Image: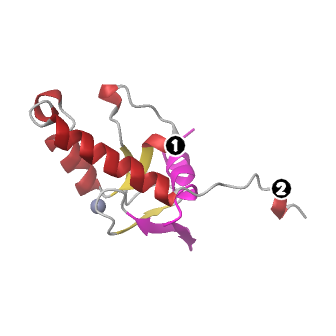
């Protein structure tokens, strides 16, 4: 699966996202502000790993969200490195739990496409 395809699958399972003329428009998982990206290239936003890959996080859709580059970068720098989150493990656990809860709250089941058969 290409990076853009992965972003499309994440947006499809996130109820804050809607397709608008070749773009996906929705809400950043981290700051909840408006965010959009090109459905074809994925440009405009980033894939956020709630539990980072460095800590064993997977590419399972439940562990992924769409985030601003800025928000994703900030989490990646300020929180995900071991020496950082070990200094404040409770706050880090709370941050991850908040993102997991937010992802679950937004979760949208994607149909098989059968309902669109003609
Ligand atoms: Zn954001």
8 lies above or below 61: below
**Image location (x, y in percent) of residue 108:** 59, 58
Q: Is residue 38 depicted above or below 4 in this figure?
A: below
Q: At 25% across and 45% down in the image, what residue appears?
A: 94
Location of residue 79 in the rendering, given as x and y in whole percent from the top left corner: 18, 40
Task: Look at 8% across and 33% down and name the residue there.
Answer: 87
Q: Residues within 10 Å of mark 2 (few under 14, many from 20)?
A: few
- Of residues 95 and 47, the one nearer the viewer is 95
Q: Please report contact status of discs 2 and 1: CB closer than 8 Å, yes or no.
A: no
Residue 1 appears left or right of 16? right
Residue position for label 2: 114
- Look at the image and give the residue range highlighted in magenta: 1-27
Asked if residue 41 lies left or right of residue 68, the reply is right
Report x, y in % for residue 27: 40, 66
Task: Out of 93 and 34, give the one closest to the viewer.
Answer: 93
15 lies left or right of 53: right
Instruction: For mark 2, give the secondary structure.
Output: helix
Scheme of colours in the image: secondary structure
The quadrant of the rendering that contains the N terminus is top right
* Residue that carries the numbered disc 1 in the rendered image: 61
């Amino acid at each position: 699966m290409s990076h853009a395809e992965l972003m499309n699958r994440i947006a499809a399972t996130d109820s804050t996202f809607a397709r608008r003329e070749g773009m996906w428009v929705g809400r950043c998982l981290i700051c909840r502000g408006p965010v959009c990206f090109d459905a074809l290239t994925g440009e405009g936003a980033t894939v956020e790993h709630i539990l980072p890959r460095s800590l064993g996080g997977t590419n399972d859709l439940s562990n992924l969200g769409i985030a601003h580059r800025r928000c994703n970068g900030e989490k990646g720098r300020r929180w995900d490195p071991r020496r950082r989150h070990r200094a404040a493990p409770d706050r880090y656990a709370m941050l991850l739990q908040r993102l997991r809860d937010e992802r679950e709250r937004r979760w949208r089941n994607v149909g098989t496409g059968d309902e669109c058969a003609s």
